[in-house]
Image (cartoon, rainbow, N blue to C red):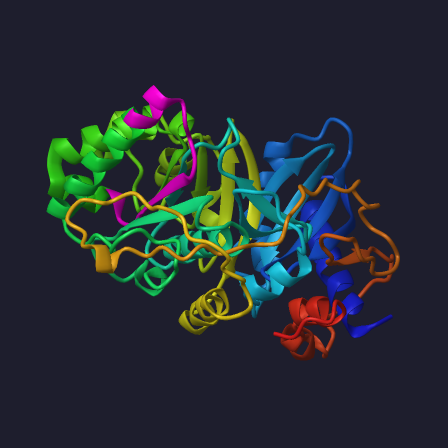
Amino acid sequence: MSKRLKMLDYQSDAIEAVLAQHKVSGQVQGGVVTPRLIKFRLAAQVGTKVSKISALAEEIAMALGVNEARIYRQGSAISVEVPRAKPEPVRLLPLCKQLKQIPPHTSILGIEDNGTPLLLRLPAPDVSHVLIAGTTGSGKSAVARALLVSLSMYNRQSEIQLILIDPKGRGFGPLTSLPHVLGEMVTSAEAAEVRLRWLVKEMERRDQSQSSRPLLVVAIDELADLIQTGGKVIEKLLTRLAQRGREAGIHLIACTQKPTAAHIGSGMTANFPVRLVGSVASKDEARYATGVADSGAEKLGGRGDFLLITKGDMVRFQSAWLGPKDVQGVVQKMMGNSFPMNHRAELPILPALSSSQRKSPIIEAKPIQPISREKEISPFPTQRVQAERGQMEHIQRKRVRAASPPRENEELQQLSLFEQFTDRLGISL
């Protein structure tokens, strides 16, 4: 048995021991190791209450020597998620190299806990607008940057254009050099009001002309701060865009720490069908952020550990990340010979914007076709498997008792599963 499987087998035995001590019958049947966490698949005896196992989260975390454990039901099995000692980032650019074809108007969020890349198509009826919530350090701005950069990489400027509103001027600062950005980044409430009024007029013009292209993606960092400084005027303008913008091809991507009605208004909270929620401070804040009771968002690990919530369904994923140098590299490829620019498009004239500040080059992309979701692979094969769109290391339980933790624990923690995952696809981090 390899060192890695020895450690996983020891942890599985520890989970089963905690259950046995509390007279709960259950067996770990397998699991999956991701860059962020280890998920064990637990099969409980028929008639066992899920709440009884969930109540043992602290005891299981203590037995495994981790800060916390997240327990929830998934289908007919119960999942036990624990964080890795040294989590690995999911970098956007290597992930993009795996996904050679991306559907139009689709962004890349990261990877799910089973290794499947998670994509988000903005014009879909169930998407429309996206609210990103979480405390400081949860990765709100990072996932928003990945979303916007991936949209720019796979869509021409004549198809998608970005409008950036960032009161602090930091979160979206690296994105200002993207050719898809219209005008300068807005950093004040007064300038935001002017820009939002123009967007409302543009929405009304599109409604009359029955047009919705190009898509206008309005990215807002620190939404609550913008509404508090701008007052009711900003709130009303944003509410109108949230209510009627989708059919006109206008989509909001907003980041905030507390998405409550008291901070961003009731009209805003009701018009974001998709929410990306990072770590929050308490269980009450998790309920406000997700709109779902017992979501477990207060137990997320931060730094890109997110839940995607839509229509009450939840998907846990590790958000993609890219640094300022990565953004510079993307811009250089767009402005260089890597992307042929055969023609220019007429861009709308934004208020308080001179002609020299408007950017007009069109990024020609190769024709792309939507990709279909492959059938799910057998959850716990005895060997590592590779799918066309994603790959993770799956483990199978072997009934070998370990009286004490293997000495190779430190070496196991130093292994980078995501690097191995990418290296096998010929992608270097």
The image position of residue 381, as x and y in percent, is 86, 53
Q: Residue furthest front?
A: 343
Task: Look at 49% across and 60% down and name the residue there.
Answer: 341
Specify whether residue 222 is painted magenta.
Answer: yes
Q: Is residue 370 visible?
A: yes
Tell me the quarter of the image containing the N terminus: bottom right
Residue pictured at 74% horizontal, 63% vertical: 8
Circle count? 0
Q: Give the extent of the magenta segment.
A: 205-223
Q: Residue at x 43, y 74 (%)?
A: 325
Judging depth in this view, the residue of 397 and 376 nearest the camera is 376
Closest to the observer, 193 or 381: 193
Q: Give residue 47's quadrant in the image.
A: top right
Percent across and percent down for residue 144 are 41, 52
Magenta stretch: includes residue 384: no
Left or right: 213 in relation to 358: right
Q: Where does the image place residue 266, in percent across and percent down from the top left?
A: 26, 26
Q: Nearer the viewer, residue 55 or 36?
A: 36
Q: Is residue 423 left or right of residue 248?
A: right
Q: Looking at the image, which residue sits at the far top?
A: 208
Q: Nearer the viewer, residue 99 or 285?
A: 99
